[in-house]
Image (cartoon, rainbow, N blue to C red):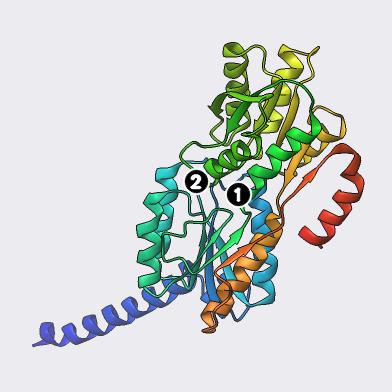
Amino acid sequence: MKRWSIYPVIIFFFFVSLILTIYFGTETFVVKKSEQKGQVDYIYHFVLIPEEVDNEYWRMIEKGARDAAEKYQVYLEYIGPSRANMEEHIQVLDKVIAGKVDGIMVQGIAESFSSLIDKAVNKGIDVVTVDTDWPKSEREVYIGTDNYKAGYLAGRALIEDTEGSQQVGIIIGRKDAIHQQLRVDGFREAIQKEDRIEVVGIEESKISKTGAVQATYNLLKEHPNITAFYGTSALDGVGIAQVIRTMKPDSDPYIITFDTLPETIDLLNNGEIDALVVQYPYEMGYRAVESLVQLQKGNHPDSIQYTKTGIWHKEDLIRQKETYLDENDPK
């Protein structure tokens, strides 16, 4: 009888130990929602998926998104591939959809994104495409550059800034990315009636400086008489200028490329790059968050919201840079 009388005591202490283990384990290893998000009462949970996490251009989009997120009490996550990679990009988007967030900001890079965007919307997740649109999908809003127009402006700048015969080498960031294709298409449209200008080759940089260097080298090897370069992504101009500086320092090809990264600005200022196609990534990020907030409230913002695009030359740099900083990143 004494042996059986011990069992309730053992069972009692077992359950007490179990409860204490669970309690203290939770306190130790689980971060409470309010603590994880800085003691702020967040209303929405949005995710921004960049093409490449540490790309300076996407960091500018992130900056705009974070400033808007702070204003509108949004918990913002910034998740994406460490290097531009279509498969990994798709995987990240799929995982975010499974996470049941309130809103997603993502590029509409290719056909493979369409079904995932539709999947998100059908699950009640608002989707805004940023930088690159995919109108065939059910995305609710696009905010970013009119990429065809941007390419067209680049072509017009080449026409206006040069004289005589021009053999052009194009370096495209990614051949499978729709926004890069549109920048090439717009450029070709602008120059198609100019008999003196001919595109002699196109190479892919894979959205990297080393890729742009290799692409420039390949173009010059195959077409040594190239007189002008057009780069469609942010690091292309840096790679082009580096190759010209080392391989053909006595030549002076016309170079036009995208975006206002610090190194690119320096190259424009010292004359190694002739013109820049300027986008407004801070504005893209800020307005993307604002649009998701409006969608969450049941409102219907304009489905296509193009941000500004322009051309910078060296002589415009000081004035344009001040204006750009004021408008694109007021902080």
Q: Nearer the viewer, residue 4 or 192?
A: 192
Please determine whether, in this image, residue 22 is positioned above or below residue 326.
Answer: below
Q: Type of residue at label 1?
A: Asn
Left or right? Give the position of 321 relative to 242: right
Verify CB contact (< 8 Å) between mark 1 and mark 2.
yes
Q: Which mark is residue 240?
A: none
Crowd class of label 1 (few under 14; some 14 to 19; many from 20; radius 10 Å): many
Residue 179 position in % (x across, y down): 54, 47
User: Could you tell whether 75 is left or right of 266 in the image?
Assistant: left
Residue nearest the viewer, comparing 8 with 39: 39
> Can see residue 329?
no
Secondary element type, mark 2 = helix
Q: Provide residue 250's location: percent of width, then percent of height.
A: 81, 12
- What residue is shown at x 64% (from left), y 49% (from top)? 149
Using the numbered discs, state the Cα–Cα distance from disc 1 to disc 2 in whole angstroms: 9 Å
- For label 1, the residue is 147
Q: Position of residue 313 (x, y in %)?
A: 84, 39
Residue picked out by circle 2: 178
Q: Which of marks 2 and 1 precedes in the sequence?
A: 1
Viewer can see residue 111: yes
